[in-house]
Image (cartoon, rainbow, N blue to C red):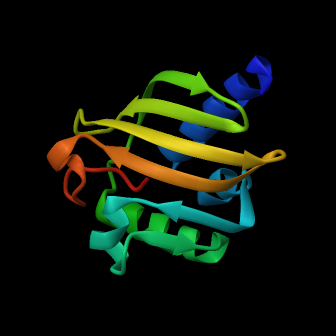
């Protein structure tokens, strides 16, 4: 992955989250995206797996509804082959990593990962 494109992606990603702009955020995700997160279990039930962009929108919208003060501070990003890890701190000070796997320019698969007990709707992010 090109480092300039990665920087632009990360900057756009955090700006969209901090503005609570789901349209801008979801523009980077494939229609058939799969996203997994322990927070999803608590917010929308099931096994924590979200299938498709419409379901991802509903999940993140519910997260923003429950966490109206959501705000991220990107600490670092890590680039792999067709993947990106965004390490950030949420509004509660919790450390989170979002692992994004790309198919071309769009995210095809994502994982929200949390430190210990931070995977709960009251203290976690929508990711």
Q: Which residue reaches farthest front?
A: 81
Q: Position of residue 56 (x, y in %)?
A: 55, 68
Taking the image as shown, residue 7 lies to the left or right of residue 74, namely right
The answer to whether residue 49 is above or below residue 81 is below
Pick the residue in front: 79 or 73: 79
Task: Answer whether residue 35 is visible to the viewer in this image.
Answer: yes
Taking the image as shown, residue 87 lies to the left or right of residue 31, namely left
Q: Which residue reaches farthest bottom?
A: 46
Residue shown at 60%/45% (left/top)? Answer: 100
Pick the residue in front: 104 or 76: 104
Q: Which residue reaches farthest right?
A: 104
Q: Position of residue 76 (x, y in %)?
A: 48, 20
Query: Dividing the image into 4 quarters, which one contains the N terminus?
Result: top right
Q: Position of residue 111 (x, y in %)?
A: 48, 52
Residue shown at 21%/50% (left/top)? Answer: 123
Q: How many marks?
A: 0
Q: Position of residue 96 (x, y in %)?
A: 35, 38
Task: Answer whether residue 21 is visible to the viewer in this image.
Answer: no
Q: Quadrant of residue 30?
A: bottom right
Q: Quadrant of residue 82?
A: top right
Residue shown at 54%/36% (left/top)? Answer: 14
The answer to whether residue 34 is above or below residue 106 is below
Pick the residue in front: 40 or 126: 40
The answer to whether residue 57 is above or below residue 93 is below
The answer to whether residue 86 is above or below residue 77 is below
């Amino acid at each position: 992955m090109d480092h300039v494109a990665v920087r632009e992606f990360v900057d756009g990603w955090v700006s969209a989250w901090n503005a609570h702009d789901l349209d801008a955020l979801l523009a980077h995700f494939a229609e058939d995206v799969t996203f997994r997160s322990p927070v999803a279990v608590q917010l929308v039930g099931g096994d924590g797996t979200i299938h498709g962009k419409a379901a991802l929108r509903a999940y993140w919208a519910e997260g923003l509804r429950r966490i109206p003060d959501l705000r991220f501070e990107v600490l670092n990003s890590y680039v792999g082959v067709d993947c990106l890890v965004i390490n950030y701190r949420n509004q509660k000070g919790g450390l989170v990593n979002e692992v994004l796997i790309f198919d071309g320019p769009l995210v095809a698969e994502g994982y929200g990962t949390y430190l210990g007990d931070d995977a709960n709707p009251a203290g976690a992010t929508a990711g």
